[in-house]
Amino acid sequence: MQLIGHKATKNQVKIALEAASKLNRSAPHMLFAGVAGCGKTSMAKYIASRSDFDFLQVPATDFKDHKSVLEVLENLNHIGYDRLGNRIGKVKPTVLFVDEVHAMPIGGQEPLGIAMEEYKVPYGKEGSCVWIPYFTLIGATTNDGILSKPFRERFQGMRFVFNTYSDEEIIKILGLHADHLGIGITPKSTREIAKRGRGVPRIAVSYLKRARDLCLSRDGNVIMHSMVIDTFDEMGIDDRGFTEVEIKILKALYDAGLPIGLENLSIVVNESAKTLSMSAEPFLIREGMIIRSGKGRTLTRQGKEYLAKIGYAGKALKSEIPTDYVRK
Ligand SMILES: Nc1ncnc2c1ncn2[C@@H]1O[C@H](COP(=O)(O)OP(=O)(O)O)[C@@H](O)[C@H]1O
Ligand SMILES: [Mg+2]
């Protein structure tokens, strides 16, 4: 499928692939960092398919030690080599995609790092090595801050960041995916979905699929505006894209009137602390609704205004919030 945006990345990749082809070797290894659902896996697949290379996806946790690294690398495409590893024809370097690469055990990072640089893995007796065909490792991570420094340095200069998209880009992405799903959609419907999509293609596309389902259940073949509105009503998502949990967070903070720590907030809204810190909280912070400090989470003025706008005036009895939920 087509990939919207990322002009600079595509350009750099194109140059690297052309050079690699002329040198009869692989393009440099790449690190894709950034927000979940913003196209890292898609870009890796795009690179493999545009060059007609094999695409091999392996979980980071499979690279545990020398042995497991070798087991994975045995699966690389060996076309173009003789048995001793000499290039005797045109090679076809595999795109080895490792998602959540920051989760790779240190024991695997070391031999894989050597394979990435020297295309061989030390093994067995002192000094003996197994040769490895050329490959391009594409590591994706939502947290490249925790990658070990030596491993990160294997991705020289080919680090690309995947951020959230503008509404205009999300609109284009939705159009593309609607075509792919074989469903019609009006421009007004697309805008309505994009408005709530948080700039994240995976979220926007998942909403599109829910609206498509509703459309089909009503025997339609074009997603009309009313269907989108009904879909979001059913999902409990308001017109700014806030979920029920997020609105609950805002209300809890309003009622408390004091900063609340993550653990306590997760009890109040009945969601895991992980879900809160990975998805709800970053969005609320980005939208200026809450701030996070050492003392906990606090509602901003904007957050209060938003609650007023949706008609929330607080709990009648503030004392209903147990005092131990409130961090002093
Ligand atoms: N730039 C883009 N253009 C078109 N579709 C995209 C784009 N980025 C992401 N998507 C779509 O969003 C979804 C999630 O993308 P994915 O590549 O899995 O994100 P990530 O690997 O960063 O978590 C997929 O359905 C993908 O097709
Ligand atoms: Mg992914």
Image (cartoon, helix red, strand yellow):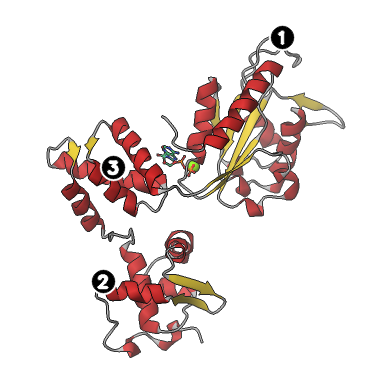
Q: Earlier in the sequence, mark 3 or mark 2?
A: 3
* Residue type of the residue flagged with mark 1: Ile
Q: Is residue 18 visible?
A: yes
Q: Where the N terminus falls, by quadrant?
A: top left
What element does badge 3 sit on? helix
* Residue type of the residue flagged with mark 2: Ile
* Residue type of the residue flagged with mark 3: Lys
Residue with the mark numbered 3: 209
Split into quadrants, the picture shows ligand 1 in the one at top left
Q: Which of label 1 and label 2 is nearer to you?
A: 2
* Residue at figure coordinates x 22%, y 42% from the top left: 213
Q: Residues within 10 Å of mark 2 (few under 14, many from 20)?
A: few
Residue with the mark numbered 2: 310
Q: Are marks 1 and 3 in contact (CB under 8 Å)?
A: no
Left or right: 297 with respect to 240? right
Residue with the mark numbered 1: 88
C-alpha separation, residue under disc 1 versus residue under disc 2: 69 Å
What element does badge 2 sit on? loop
Above or below, 253 relative to 243: below
Quadrant assignment, res 189: top left
